[in-house]
Image (cartoon, grey):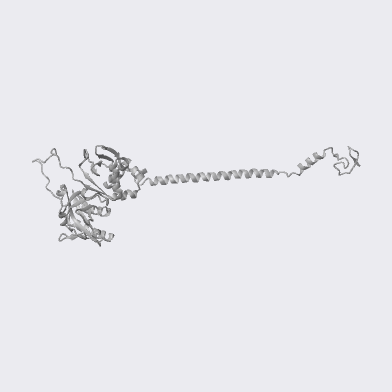
Amino acid sequence: MKKFCSKCGAPLKPDDQFCPKCGASVDGNSKQELEKINSIKQRPQIKRSEIHNSKSNFKTRNIIIGVVIAIVVLVAGGWAIYQHGRSSAESKIIGGNGRLTTAEIKKMPNKQLAAWAILYADKKYGKKWGEAADELRSGHLTIKSYSSHKFGDYEISATNGSTLYAVNNQVGYLISKDKKEITYVGNKSNYSNRDVLEQIYPVIKSENTEENVSNWNNNLTIVKGKDRTASSSTKKFTTEEKKDTKTTKLWSDEQRDRLISYMDEFGDKMHQPYSHYTGSGSITTAAGQEYPSFLSEGKFKLSSGDKDSRDPEDMDSINLKWNPDVTDKDNDSNTYNVVAIFNYNGKSAEQHITYLFCFYHGEPVALVDQTTNGEYTVVHATANHDLTSNFEEIANND
């Protein structure tokens, strides 16, 4: 059956959608509307499977981001724990958590206590302590032990088993019998301050390495000082009391031979062949001193050992005596009793090294003479820790 346009009556072909004469839509829609419908039909359609895949990819991406964040947090936490553990381990050099036990305190050498006491006082108390600490760090420091000593306006006595040490004429310290307390003493302006060793140790440990403290220990010598003459109120012996007449020799042939053997080894190690005084004749240094006669002829001054120390005129004069038969009865004498002499002569007078091994107030002291000229012969306690410790062992028959 033949079709006609409903608008103008023009004939239509079977497949016409619009009237070729008036342009009217065969189905009743406008041309614009039909184009819009065809445009929508031609758009690509999103499949359901593609929507599902898109959601899955988004979920996977969120999971990956979460895993990465978790890994970063774990790594950061692990590093913090490692650093904490490392610092904790480093703080446990001595005792738990850097604290000293009673047993550790009891075994601590007096020289280490002295170094700690001075380094701590340098931080907390006055100028005189700073000067002592500088000497300890830069070269050598000698301190003296007393039963009583006058610091400025105060005379301090060691009581209740404590030990008194004088760093100089203005400052010193007392170590309690159990070594747990250090009481700093001095002249009128700074007497006195008490500190507990367990509080001192963390300060020293935090500001100084173990190696530095050990080196400073080696730069320090402790000798027994001469106590003041007893006052009239001091108790005297009565006729009913018996004086101890027994004497004890402090030096023997066996100890002499041990020292000779050690000095041979020491000389080999230092590449300095030492000769020793055998008891007859003399031993002459490259500077011209003839020992042992020079001990009574020379004018000796005691230095702290610091090469930049004061003029010899201002140093303390000391007496030395050749006395290999020294006994405990000589302990009250203010004389360095020399029991052995060893000398090394280098290529010039400036290179001679003379060791004078002595007992002073019953304590072993190794003095060094390297003087080349001048009115005085300046000696100081050796800073060589190995030599000092070996002489102390031999002197104490250890």
179 horizontally vs 71: left or right: left
Q: Position of residue 220 (x, y in %)?
A: 27, 49
Kindly give the residue lying farthest to the left in the view shown.
239
Image coords of residue 59 (percent x, y): 61, 43
Residue at 59% across, 43% down = 62
Q: Quadrant of residue 128?
A: top left
Q: Residue at point 62% right, 43% down?
A: 58
Image quadrant where residue 10 sits = top right
* Nearer to me, 100 or 387: 387
x, y percentage for residue 103? 30, 44
Q: Nearer the viewer, residue 45 or 23?
A: 23
Q: Going 63% across and 44% down the picture, which residue do you hit? A: 56
Q: Position of residue 378 (x, y in %)?
A: 21, 53
Q: Quadrant of residue 30?
A: top right
Residue located farthest toward the bottom when viewing the structure as drawn: 347
Q: Quadrant of the N terminus?
A: top right
